[in-house]
Image (spheres, rainbow, N blue to C red):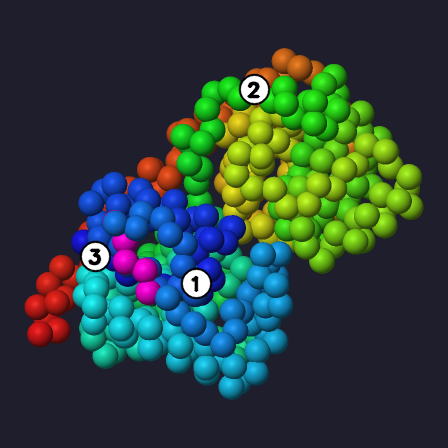
Amino acid sequence: MKILFLYDFPLWGTGSGVYLRNLVEELVKLNHKIGIVAPEERRFLEDKIKQYRVEPPQIPVFVGHPELKGAKRYSELSSREITEIYKSFLDTTLEAVANFEPDLIHVNHLSLITWVARYIKALKNIRYIITSHGSCLYNLLSDKRYFSLSEDAVRHARAITVVSGDSRSKFLKMFGRGYAKNLSIVSGGVDIKSFPQQINTSRMDKKYKIKDEKVILFTGRLISAKGVSYLVKAAKDIKAEIFVVGEGPEKQHLLNLVDKKQLQNVHLLGYLTGQQLINFYYRADVFVAPSVWDEPLGLTILEAMASKTPVIATRKGGIPLLVKHNVNGLFVRPRNAQKIADACNKLLKDDKLREKMGEAARKTVEEKFTWKKIALKYHRLYKKHARLNNRNHRR
């Protein structure tokens, strides 16, 4: 089939960008032809996919993004800016539809790009499905300007997917229980090829002078919702070196907290990607995800689990879909530094328990969260909802 993706962020981004790129790579292996409408381009699978570049006057974000300097939140856009962004996506999508002739459109994010898919459906009778990655639901709740047209787009979608059970509950509360039969959970995943059974991390020991030290790791956007300040507050009671990987508006506050408490075992490293980050996952003895908001899924948690690293996390949002208490990790109460410290020390002092949970974490990823398995779910969804005679129907 020919699947045209609509995406409102640059393709090189993290989070939903990782989701989209990995999904596309697996769909190509399943012999689907792929087109992508997105701002800016990322050159991957050049001979396999068609990319249609949107040039909007502004790239909006839901909660902030460290790689998009100067980006505005959806809630900060004026009516004119919303209209201009919509028009830029509509113009490019119309061009893509004429050139690519898709059998189905797959919209990633429940935002103004769903309005584009709805318009194309009315104009060209091309069916579409919508994937919500979680943050877009918060935007609809906080800014009612986007709700009416989004609701109309949801009403005419052939199917909707969300990345977690928590997002499913929020969606149904927002739009109504009547959509339950049309709504399914398709979580994010891990490129398991990038996570072998073992990695030699001796160079990291030398670089960061941690040869004989236990290591706690957090990685993600440094925003208050991630709860990293509670990990920093717990540091004085944790018998390990704590590495915080990421950038964001919370970074200065965390640096001030480290200075105020005179913490010698907390290290803020900034933004790392690729093999550098993967090496950290493997070197870590424990991964901590102290979120205080309903995390849609948590791809960093999955990556840590793929590295055989047990996870300490809060029972927020989609995290319980991944982490099972006393099986592949531990749950702690949100906003509780002492509980974080206690859980960390429990795993740090018990090598056998930590190893057992790490193996269980890896098994969880292999059985449920590889991109191949996720792509097969979409493959079946596409077969169910795409009209393969769309092009003949339009003619």
Taking 170 as reference, is 88 above or below it? below
Amino acid type of the residue that numbered disc 2 sits on in the rendered structure: Asn
Q: Give whichever of 296, 265 is nearer the camera.
A: 265
Magenta region, residue range: 48-52
User: Is residue 11 something that shows in the picture?
Assistant: yes
Measuring from the top left, give residue 193's x and y in whole percent: 40, 30
The dot on residue 2 is 3
Q: Give whichever of 317, 278 is nearer the camera.
A: 278
**Callouts 3 and 2 close, C-beta under 8 Å:** no
The kind of secondary structure the magenta stretch mainly shows is: strand
For the residues marked 3 and 2, what is the alpha-carbon distance in whole angstroms?
Answer: 42 Å
Q: Residue at x 78, y 32 (%)?
A: 341
Specify the quadrant that holds the N terminus.
bottom left
Q: Residue at x 58, y 36 (%)?
A: 277
Q: Earlier in the sequence, mark 1 or mark 2?
A: 1
The label nearer to you, 3 versus 1, is 1
State which quadrant residue 2 falls in: bottom left
SS class of the residue under badge 2?
Answer: loop
Measuring from the top left, give residue 144's x and y in whole percent: 54, 77
Name of the residue lying farthest toward the bottom:
80
User: Is residue 329 something that shows in the picture?
Assistant: no
Taking 49 as reference, is 54 above or below it? below
The dot on residue 200 is 2
